[in-house]
Image: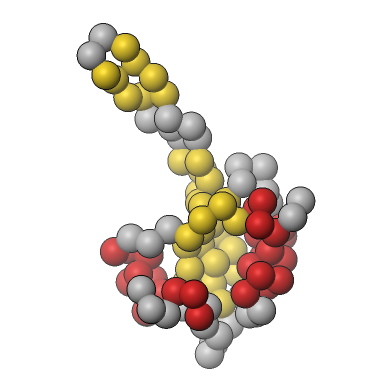
Amino acid sequence: MDPREILIRPLITEKSHRLMEKHNQYTFEVHPDANKIQIRKAVEQLFKVRVVAVNTVRIPGKVRRVGRFTGRLPDRKKAIVTLAEGERIQAFEGI
């Protein structure tokens, strides 16, 4: 898989911003079939940083309702990537 297919988008929330500042951890939404090794290689290749650890979380899709019609949001996968001491991802710095 191409690294741009593995990393779908960065997740910017209050909690993820706190993780960036205190623990040097960055949060991404990733392809549901990607494993930790693929995620590590994708982050290292795209952002030219050294990754120490990768934690993943599967998020089941929620049921949504509009009037009498119900639907379901897709399942997602989130990765929390810990970088080596002193490493930063420049794309996140201005946020």
Q: Residue furthest left?
A: 67
Answer above or below: position of 74 versus 1: above
Q: Answer with the quarter of the image where residue 66 lies.
A: top left
Residue 23, can we see it?
A: no
- The answer to whether residue 69 is seen in the rendering is yes
- Left/right placement of residue 4 relative to residue 57 reads right
Q: Is residue 49 above or below residue 76?
A: below
Say which residue appears at 62% left-offset and 74% top-offset: 47
Q: Quadrant of residue 82 in the image?
A: bottom right
The residue lying toward the viewer, choosing from 64 and 37, is 64
What's the residue at 38%, 30% (across, down)? 62
Which x, y percent locates residue 4? 66, 57
Extreme bottom residue here?
A: 86
Q: Is residue 57 above or below residue 47?
A: above
Toward the viewer: 53 or 21?
Answer: 21
Q: Residue at x 63, y 80 (%)?
A: 49
Image-quadrant location for residue 38: bottom right
